[in-house]
Image: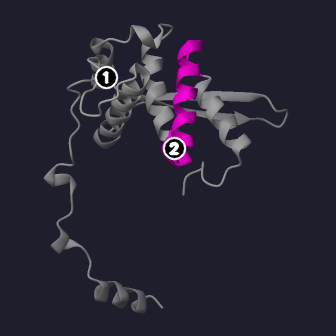
Amino acid sequence: MSSYSNLSDDDFWRRMDRCLALVPHEANRSMLRRYIKERLANGIKPSTLASDANAVRGLLLHMGARPIESLTREDVMEYVTHAYSQVRWVNADKQGKETVTTKRVRIGNTTLCVRKITIRDSVSWMRGTKDEDEYPPEVRGLKTSRASEEDTIPTDELIARSDLLAMIQAHR
């Protein structure tokens, strides 16, 4: 279950605003908030919205203080080629003083694939692209891949229900 499940609207936006606060350009932060609001209005789950906000935030952090309107194909390719996530912990001591710890971590292939889809969709939304088959030039041709054969489990190697029940019985 996501940490965004079952949150009140105020708690959801408090967490979302904390995530968006790291975006250095105010107009980019505002655009991302509007994107999240629209997707929320369309019934997208809060956990998905949190993931989407994180993906787009990564691209916006990569852009730095530049406005999203200046996004180029080179920006997108540079971001996905060198995609890192910034893991961030905030701890408070007994007096309430917060210590922020950050660490850069390379993004895995599956996460990168999901981020590419999110970035493609968000840039299309931002550019007002109506045709879902035609993406803006900045993200057009951004390929996503399915899991390779070595990343999947053949169905004949999955555990049978009868074997699972036998293992449960053995542990009782």
Whether residue 84 sits left or right of residue 1 in the image: it is: left
Q: Is residue 78 magenta?
A: no
Dot 2: element: loop
The spot of residue 23 in percent (x, y) is 55, 19
Q: Residue at coordinates 53% horizontally, 21% vertically from top-left?
A: 31
Residue 42's disc is 2
Q: Vertical placement of 105 versus 152: above or below?
A: above
Q: Are marks 2 and 1 in contact (CB under 8 Å)?
A: no
- Compared to residue 150, the image places residue 123 above or below, namely above
Q: Which residue extends farthest front?
A: 130
C-alpha distance separating marks 2 and 1: 32 Å
Nearest to the observer: residue 170 or residue 51: 51
Q: Quadrant of residue 25?
A: top right
The three-letter amino acid code for the residue at tag 1 is: His
Q: Secondary structure at mark 1?
A: loop
Which residue type does callout 2 highlight?
Asn
Where does residue 82 sit, x and y in percent of width and height? 31, 22
- State the quadrant of the N terminus: bottom right
Mark with earlier residue (2, 1): 2
Residue range of the region highlighted in magenta in the rendering: 22-50
Residue pushed farthest right?
Answer: 95
Q: Which mark is residue 82?
A: 1
Q: How is the image coloured?
A: one colour
Q: Is residue 138 left or right of residue 169?
A: left
Specify whether residue 46 is painted magenta.
yes
